[in-house]
Image (tube, grey):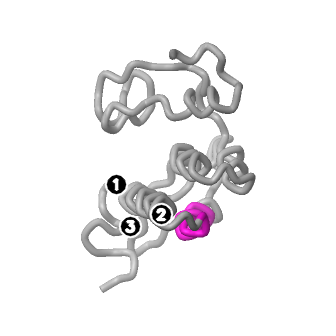
Amino acid sequence: GKWWGGYYGWRWPHGFVTIIEPLTNACMNAVLLTGDISQLDLARQQLDANWALRQECEGHWLVPYKHVDAGWTDYRRPAPKYPIYLWIISMADEDLERINRIPKDHDWNEVIVPTVSGADKKTGRDTKHYIGNTQPWFQYIRGCNPEYPQ
């Protein structure tokens, strides 16, 4: 086998999402169970490794979402929700830095009402499970989005 292959591996259609989403959830649960904030380090390392592979394309930073025989591929804009989730648990500057390094590709204060679960073609946002307002909520709890719905 190949280190990057297998079922739900780097070559799976969702690629990086299939790796970082459960990893982030597992690390956050480990913090809740142990109180040890260092449990977030594995997810942090994965985000940092993915960011280190970034490429600039037409003025946008893109990170790889898949790996195949030819190498890293399927470069997309990085998803800010995963470092936001880590910061919500840690409130650490290092996690805030992971968020701030991601260029904003839309108004992070804009609240939407998701109408689809998944990639929303109208808004260009990922609203898996109808969760589409992570960034506006993040802005709100930092005092940067006073108009966020209550």
Q: Secondary structure at mark 3?
A: loop
Mark 2 sits on what residue?
27
Along the line of sight, which residue is nearer the eye, 127 or 9?
127
Q: Is residue 7 left or right of residue 76?
A: left
Mark 3 sits on what residue?
10
Along the line of sight, which residue is nearer the eye, 90 or 72?
90
Please tell me whether mark 1 or mark 2 is closer to you in this view: 2
Q: CA distance from mark 1 to mark 2?
A: 20 Å
Is 83 above or below relative to 30? above
**For the point 54% across and 70% down, which residue is it?**
42
Graded by Cα atoms within 10 Å as few (under 14), some (14 to 19) or many (20 or more), the crowding at tag 3 reads many
Inspect the image, locate mark 3, and give the three-letter code of the amino acid beneath it. Trp
Along the line of sight, which residue is nearer the eye, 81 or 119?
81
**For the point 62% across and 47% down, which residue is it?**
57
Q: CA distance from mark 1 to mark 3?
A: 8 Å
**For the point 69% across and 32% down, which residue is it?**
142
Is 137 above or below relative to 3? above
Mark 1 sits on what residue?
14
Inspect the image, locate mark 1, and give the three-letter code of the amino acid beneath it. His
Q: CA distance from mark 2 to mark 3?
A: 19 Å
Q: Secondary structure at mark 1?
A: loop
**For the point 57% across and 61% down, which residue is it?**
47
Image quadrant in which you'd find residue 94: bottom right
* Relative image position of residue 150 (x, y in whole percent): 51, 16
- Evaluate if marks 2 and 3 touch, with contact meaning CB atoms under 8 Å apart: no
Question: Does the magenta portion include 38?
Answer: yes
The stretch of residues the image draws in magenta is: 37-48
Q: Is residue 30 visible?
A: yes
Question: Does the magenta portion include 137?
Answer: no
Graded by Cα atoms within 10 Å as few (under 14), some (14 to 19) or many (20 or more), the crowding at tag 2 reads many
Q: Secondary structure at mark 2?
A: helix
